Image (cartoon, helix red, strand yellow):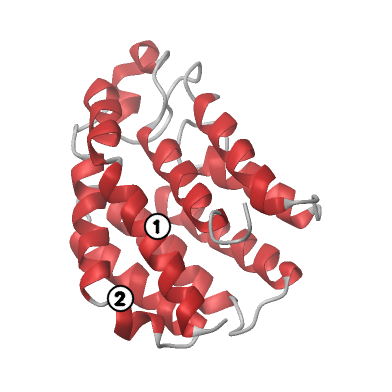
Amino acid sequence: MDAALQKKLILSMANAMISHAEELTALDQAIGDGDHGLNMKRGFENVLEHVDATAAKPLPEALKAIGMALVMKVGGASGPLYGTLFMSLGKEIPPQPSLDDAARALGAAIEAVKARGKSDFGQKTMLDVLGPVHAAIADGASDLASTLPVIAAEAAEATAPLKAIRGRASFLGDRSIGHVDPGARSSALLVSAICSNFGV
């Protein structure tokens, strides 16, 4: 993957987090600390500060750099979880990945996020979006650039009727039901931002 495309992908992800910060914070105010949007915005603003240097790195190193920035700048549980996601992707993916490479790397990164958060699918977290997205990639679904954003958005909305099992939202018990998980929503936004660079 060349530096120009990597820069476009980084800019798209950062702009998505920054422009949706208020929405993500509002979702988190309902069932969490109320700072998810602001935290993700701060993390990706830091990523933007180094966008040219990061984009010039080989893809694995660029992903690791993004992950490290998120660990350092995003507060709460989101920093370690998103940092783990990006750093694990960087560890697993080759510089010029095929679709199979991407599926395998995302699968490994999901397992790393599960281990970091001691969580699993169906527990009202970012995993509930990453799982269906990974399944679609692994299955070789057609026209991924247009189908993945839909799959991700629907998966995020599908967290609303779930009862939170992990994270601060779990403290609310049944009162967490009826709200979209902010981590699931931010994951869906990142998927959509990435796909927007591939001919949608």
Identity, as a three-letter code, of the amino acid under mark 1: Met
Q: Nearer the viewer, residue 18 or 90?
A: 18
Is 50 on the left or on the right of 112, as rendered?
Answer: left
Residue 111 location (% of width, % of height) = 56, 57
The answer to whether residue 63 is visible is: no
Q: Nearer the viewer, residue 51 or 183?
A: 51
Secondary element at image label 2: helix
Residue 45 location (% of width, % of height) = 21, 61
Q: Earlier in the sequence, mark 2 or mark 1?
A: 1
- The residue under label 2 is 51
Q: Quadrant of residue 158?
A: top right
The answer to whether residue 180 is visible is: yes
Q: What residue lies at 49% left-to-right and 42% top-to-bottom?
A: 188
Is 3 on the left or on the right of 175, as rendered?
Answer: right
Say the numbered circle drawn on residue 79. none
Identity, as a three-letter code, of the amino acid under mark 2: Val
Is 31 on the left or on the right of 102, as rendered?
Answer: left
Q: Nearer the viewer, residue 182 or 44?
A: 44
Q: CA distance from mark 2 to mark 1?
A: 11 Å
**Residue 9 position (above or below residue 172):** below
- The residue under label 1 is 13
Residue 180 location (% of width, % of height) = 42, 25
Residue 56 location (% of width, % of height) = 40, 87
Q: What residue lies at 18% left-to-right and 44% top-to-bottom?
A: 38
Dots 2 and 1: beta carbons under 8 Å?
no
Query: How many other residues sit within 10 Å of disc 1, few (<14), some (14-19) or many (≥20)?
Result: many
Q: What residue lies at 58% left-to-right and 76% top-to-bottom?
A: 92
**Residue 54 position (above or below residue 36):** below
Quick one: quadrant of the N terminus?
A: bottom right
